[in-house]
Structure formats: structure tokens, C-alpha cells
Image: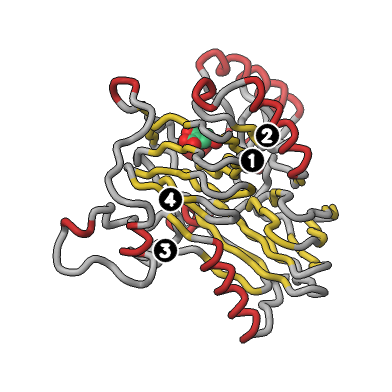
Amino acid sequence: MNAVPGSNEARVLLQGLYADMAPQHLYPLWEVLSALVTPTPRSAAQAHLWHYDAARAHLLRAGDLITAEQAERRVLILENPGLPGTSSVTTSLYAGLQLILPGEVAPCHRHTQCALRFVMEGDGAFTALDGERAVMRPFDLVLTPNWQWHDHGNDSSDPMIWLDGLDIPTVRHFAASFAERLPDGAMAHAETAPPGDTLARYGRNLRPFGGTAAARRPASLPLFHYPFAEWRASLAAMARADAPDPHLGHALEFVNPADGGPVMPTVAAHVRLLPKGFTTRPRQATDATVFVVVEGEGTARIGEQDFPPVERDLFVVPSWESLAIEARRDLVLFAYSDAAAQQKLGLWREARL
Ligand code: GTQ
């Protein structure tokens, strides 16, 4: 059966072809190409703001109903409203708020997902990484890189809440998830070093000299604790010395001292300070980004929408949505994204408008 390509008759015959192919899982690219290979990014993710106080109230209710041990991790997932049912905050990343009550332990496990913790509230609980505790204080950043044992506990007298940022959707995309618990039902890893040992060895532009025993941590990613007191002081010094970048404000990225790159292979993190009254120029980037307001308040204009976050609120900016931030008071932000992965893959782009 022949028909002139593009004629009505050909269109009818094509529908017949599609119907005959579909049972064999064969489909015509030409019907979907423009939606697959788009001239600019198109994300199903939506901009969204979570108010911390509301999320915290639900999390504390959960704290009355399930223990950290029963839950393994007692966490409320921040799910992007445009990605329902995926437990994703962006197409590649996960976000959740984790609660550990005084005396509780979140049992030791390891998995191929990389995680960061950003402390929202509480002082003195810990994450132990391969048996070394990082004592967590408000707005500290703590990493648990891929396949390293980690348990969490709270020896303080107050609830501890932190943001979990993981690459769960990325690992799911590659279908590369492995996870295990410590053998014999052990809850906590045996102590391998005193608290703060790694920070002292690797966190001050130093590293162990002259031998592998003292190196102790994996050479490719030794450091896992970035205390608030240190990063906040650096931002303040930068703000005293320079005018803010028009699109970012004062911004500092957390780096892996082993290679000067982002903190983990899939996840990058940075902080910003926008002086009171300053408004950034709009900027687009391919790395959808999760923000936490550490201090101050302002307005985040994401695309055409305005969001008014206050201290401890969280918001997400999808890929290639323009973002302009106005600081009503000095505004300090923490942010994480998949820029680390995109840069390795040659995908990352930004546009400064
Ligand atoms: O603390 O290991 O929010 O494995 C989700 C998965 C936290 C964790 C989460 C996890 C963890």
C-alpha cells in the first residue's frame, strides 16, 4: 500500500503502522522527538516553599508515634509537588527532615546513596561516620558519602532536627542501589577515632604527612564535617572585603580538600550571604537547587512566582527557572544541588540575566 508521504492517506496508514508496532514495543521517534530533545530544559519539578514551623510540628507528632529505631530513619520527605509519588525534591535529588529525640539512636547502615546533613535545630547530637562522631551544632554541614557506615544518635537533652539531602533519585535512575545493616543487629559502629579527629587532620588545609596509617580516611574524600562557625566567619569576612556578586551575593562553595571539587560526586553545596536591601539579578542554572534560610528573610522570585521564606524555611528552584532573591534583612542561605554530577557529565550551564 503506497501513499504520498504527508498526505491524509499516509497519516491514516501511519496510525495503522503504530498500532501494529506497539505490541512489539516499537514506537516512532518522529512523534516525540521535540519533547525528548528540547531546546532548553523542561522540568516537571515545580518551585515550592516549605515552612519549617509547620513541618516541624508534624515531625514532632511522628516522634510521639514511632521511634527512630522502629523507623530506621524518622524522616518527613519534602516531595516536589510536580513529582508526586517519587520521593524527589528535584528530578535528581531527595530532601527530608530527620528527627532524633534525646537518647535515641538511628541504627548504623550504609548505602550507595550519598547524603548530606544540614542541622536545622538542636545541639550536640552526632552522626558517626565509619565509627567517628561528628558532634552536630546548628547549621553545621555533615557528609555521609556513598558506602560509608553511618549511625546517628542524640545524647543531648533536646530534640535534634536536620535536613537530609541525598542523591536517591540519581541512584534510582542508574538502578545502582545497594544497602546493608551492620552484622549481628548491632545498632552503632564501634568507635574508630575520637570526635573531631578528621576535622583536625583534614579540615584546616592540612593532611597527614608521611604515612598511610595516619591518613585513616578514604584518600578521595576525607573530610565530612564543615562547622557553621567556620563557614559563617568566612562569609562575613568576604562580605567585609568585597561588593556582592550581582547574581549570587557573597557565595562560598564547600569543597572536598582532596581534589578541590564539590563535596561529593553527585552533590554540590554552597552558602550565600545577601546584605540587607540587596536584590540579586535573575539567574538560571541547569542544577535544580534546594535552599535553606539560615538567617534573615526575603523574597525569592522563581520564574514568575514570589515566595517569602523566613528563617529555617526551605525552598526548591527547578532547573532553568530564573531565580532572583531580595534580602529584607541580612540573608544567609545554604544550598545543595546536583551541579557536581552535571559538571562531570558536561551538562551544567547557567545564564546570568
Ligand atoms: O540517614 O541514612 O532521609 O538512608 C533517607 C535515607 C536519611 C540516612 C534519609 C537514608 C537516610
Q: Give me the C-alpha separation between circle 3 and circle 4.
A: 22 Å
The amino acid type of the residue labelled 2 equals Leu
- Give the residue type at disc 3: Gly
What's the image's color scheme? secondary structure
x then y, percent, for residue 25? 52, 19
Q: Name the mark on residue 261.
A: 3
Query: Does mark 1's beta carbon lie closer than 8 Å to ligand 1?
Result: no
In the displayed structure, 221 sits above or below 91; it is below
Residue at disc 1, secondary structure:
loop
The quadrant in which residue 35 appears is: top right
Alpha carbons under labels 1 and 2: distance apart: 8 Å
Instruction: Please state which of the two labelled residues, at mark 3 or mark 2, is closer to the viewer.
Output: 3
Residue highlighted by disc 4: 134
Camera-near label (4 vs 2) is 4
Mark 4 Cα-neighbour bin, 10 Å: few <14, some 14–19, many ≥20: many
In the shown orientation, is residue 225 left or right of residue 13? left
Mark 1 residue crowding within 10 angstroms, few (<14) / some (14–19) / many (20+): many
Q: In the rendered image, is residue 308 in sight? A: yes
Q: CA distance from mark 3 to mark 2?
A: 30 Å
The alpha-carbon separation of the residues under discs 1 and 4 comes to: 26 Å
Tell me the amino acid under the disc marked 4: Ala
Earlier in the chain: of badge 1 and badge 2, it is 2
| Circle on res. 83 | 2
Query: Residue beneath label 1, please?
Result: 89
> Which residue is found at the position 43% from the left and 53% from the top?
264
Q: Position of residue 321 (x, y in %)?
A: 72, 55
Disc 3: CA contacts within 10 A as few (<14), some (14-19) or many (>=20): some
- Please tell me how crowded label 2 is: few (under 14), some (14-19), or many (20+) other residues with Cα within 10 Å: some
Q: Nearer the viewer, mark 3 or mark 4?
A: 4
Q: Which is more toward the observer, 278 or 121? A: 121
Q: Earlier in the sequence, mark 4 or mark 2?
A: 2
Residue at (68% x, 46% y) in the render: 42
